[in-house]
């Protein structure tokens, strides 16, 4: 089988897995979200002004580093288990559920930070779903890694929400929003 045929087969299987969904497919969304979020953090580090610029200077690189490690860890775990991962820019754009807007770099620093918090919150929706699917498919190492990522994200949301003077759940997903997921 040629490399093109192998890739076409992978894309067909990926389409099936994303409509089922499977733990691997849901993790593909997480991988895409991590990469796009890392890019958004980088942008906020460069453009945020006011107190948020200080927050981003202190935490931005840590966030990016952690998300990059998780990106690589999840990629490796999926590949080592015979699962496909998003490998092209088109796939990353297709699988991410985070919104990008080049104009956002000109928004107030606190608004840029809050957008990153909401992105963290969006990621938790996919992570909790992948954890459930991982448990159902008896994939303990995936469940362990994703549980650690979920815990880390919740810590970052709490930290940033406190910095902004928000209650923990201000502006974040609630059960009433289920129709949006």
Image (cartoon, rainbow, N blue to C red):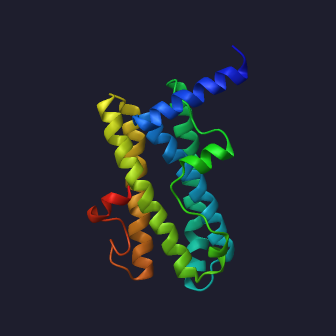
Query: Residue 36: which quarter of the image?
Result: bottom right
Judge by depth and name the residue closer to the eye, 138 or 93. Answer: 93
Residue 29: x %, y % from top left: 50, 46
| Residue 169 located left or right of residue 109 | left
Number of callouts in the render? Answer: 0
Q: Quick one: quadrant of the C terminus?
A: bottom left
Up/down of 159 relative to 98, above or below: below
Residue 178: x %, y % from top left: 31, 58
The residue positioned 45% from the left and 67% from the top of the image is 118
Judge by depth and name the residue closer to the eye, 100 or 30. Answer: 100
The residue positioned 35% from the left and 45% from the top of the image is 129
| Residue 8 located left or right of residue 78 | right
Query: Residue 167: which quarter of the image?
Result: bottom left
Up/down of 1 relative to 146, above or below: above
Residue 104: x %, y % from top left: 62, 74
The residue positioned 66% from the left and 68% from the top of the image is 43
Up/down of 90 relative to 77, above or below: below
Q: Residue furthest left?
A: 175
Q: Quick one: quadrant of the N terminus?
A: top right
Residue 133: x %, y % from top left: 34, 37
Up/down of 94 relative to 19, above or below: below
Q: Residue furthest top?
A: 1
Q: Residue furthest bottom?
A: 50
């Amino acid at each position: 089988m040629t490399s093109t045929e192998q890739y076409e087969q992978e894309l067909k299987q990926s389409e099936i897995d994303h409509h089922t969904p499977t733990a691997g497919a849901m993790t593909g969304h997480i991988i895409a979200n991590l990469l796009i979020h890392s890019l958004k953090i980088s942008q906020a580090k460069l453009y945020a002004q006011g107190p948020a610029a200080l927050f981003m200077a202190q935490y931005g690189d840590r966030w990016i580093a952690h998300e990059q490690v998780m990106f690589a860890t999840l990629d490796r775990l999926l590949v080592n288990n015979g699962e496909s991962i998003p490998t092209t820019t088109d796939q990353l754009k297709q699988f991410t559920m985070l919104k990008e807007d080049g104009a956002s770099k000109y928004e107030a620093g606190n608004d840029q930070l809050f957008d990153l918090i909401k992105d963290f919150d969006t990621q938790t929706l996919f992570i909790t779903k992948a954890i459930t699917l991982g448990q159902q498919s008896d994939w303990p190492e995936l469940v362990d890694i994703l549980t650690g990522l979920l815990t880390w994200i919740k810590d970052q949301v709490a930290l940033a929400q406190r910095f902004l003077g928000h209650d923990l759940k201000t502006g974040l997903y609630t059960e009433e929003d289920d129709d949006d997921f």
